[in-house]
Image (cartoon, grey):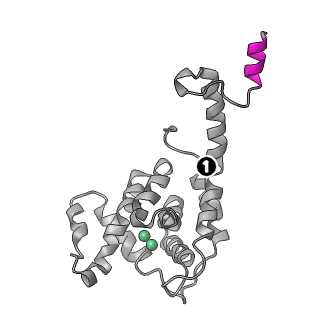
Amino acid sequence: MSATETDRSVASQVSFTAMADGTRADYELIAEHDARNADRTAERMIALLKSMDGPSPYPISRLQHVLQSATRAEADGADDETIAVALLHDIGDQISPHNHSQVAAAILKPYVSERNWWIVQHHGLFQGYYWFAHYQRDPNERDRYADHPHYPACVDFCERWDQNCFDPNYATKPLAHFEPLVHQLFAAAKTEFV
Ligand SMILES: [Fe+2]
Ligand SMILES: [Fe+2]
């Protein structure tokens, strides 16, 4: 084995300073790093959820809001993925409030069904049904998607597991109850790294 091959087998950094010069071995090293990083996605999401605790303009914190969303979904017999999606539907608020629905949907996309992705992607617009009228906006703006196959599911999500999830007297389950579902959700992506 040459010195170069030995060095490559124990390399902890790539050989290039420009991607155009990278070798297959370099990209395998990066892939190992990316896989370990991806393994910590659930931990990062749980940390983001914890950061949603504290003061809010609602009767409960934003963490309690999403916990209530997940609790109601579970009580209604939703599957594990959908319960986890209910828990994570507002995670985009901690990164980019102006487009929180799309940010959350992008994070979840590799791990969830097309239907659950679509619900998270559009839930902000669909929630407008409950408040747009106060700002001279059409509450039925969402109806431009009326013919979409996931329109009824998104209406249902907002009605049963989002707009009503600000009740301080509801028996909301703690984050610890849902953490295994978060780890389960992020355990396997359905898509390649891009
Ligand atoms: Fe939201
Ligand atoms: Fe919400």
Residue furthest toward the front?
17
In the image, taking residue 3 as reference, residue 126 lies left or right, namely left
Give above or below for 31 relative to 102.
Answer: above
Magenta portion: prevailing SS class = helix
Which is nearer the eye, 38 or 27? 27
Q: Is residue 181 visible?
A: yes
Q: Which amino acid does label 1 sit on?
A: Ala
Residue 44 occupies which quadrant of the picture? bottom right
Kindly identify the residue that appears in the image at 47 percent across and 80 percent down: 165
Q: Is residue 8 magenta?
A: yes
Pick the quarter of the image with the N terminus: top right
In the image, taking residue 156 as reference, residue 57 lies left or right, namely right
Crowd rating for badge 1 (residues with CA inside 10 Å; few <14, some 14–19, many 20+): some
Q: Position of residue 33 (x, y in %)?
A: 66, 38
- Residue assigned mark 1: 187
Q: Position of residue 32 (x, y in %)?
A: 66, 35
Kindly identify the residue that appears in the image at 21 percent across and 59 percent down: 147
In the image, taking residue 191 as reference, residue 9 lies left or right, namely right
Q: Where is residue 166 in the image (x, y as percent from the top left)?
A: 48, 83
Give the magenta-colored segment's residue range. Answer: 3-10
What kind of element bears circle 1? loop
Kindly identify the residue that appears in the image at 29 percent across and 76 percent down: 129
Give the image quadrant in which the ligand numbered 2 is located: bottom left
Give above or below for 80 relative to 189.
Answer: below
Kindly identify the residue that appears in the image at 50 percent across and 37 percent down: 192
Residue 156 occupies which quadrant of the picture? bottom left
Q: Can residue 155 be seen in this view?
A: no
Which is nearer the eye, 151 or 10? 10
Q: Where is residue 35 in the image (x, y as percent from the top left)?
A: 63, 40
Residue 7 occupies which quadrant of the picture? top right
Q: Does the magenta stretch include residue 2?
A: no
Residue furthest toward the top?
2
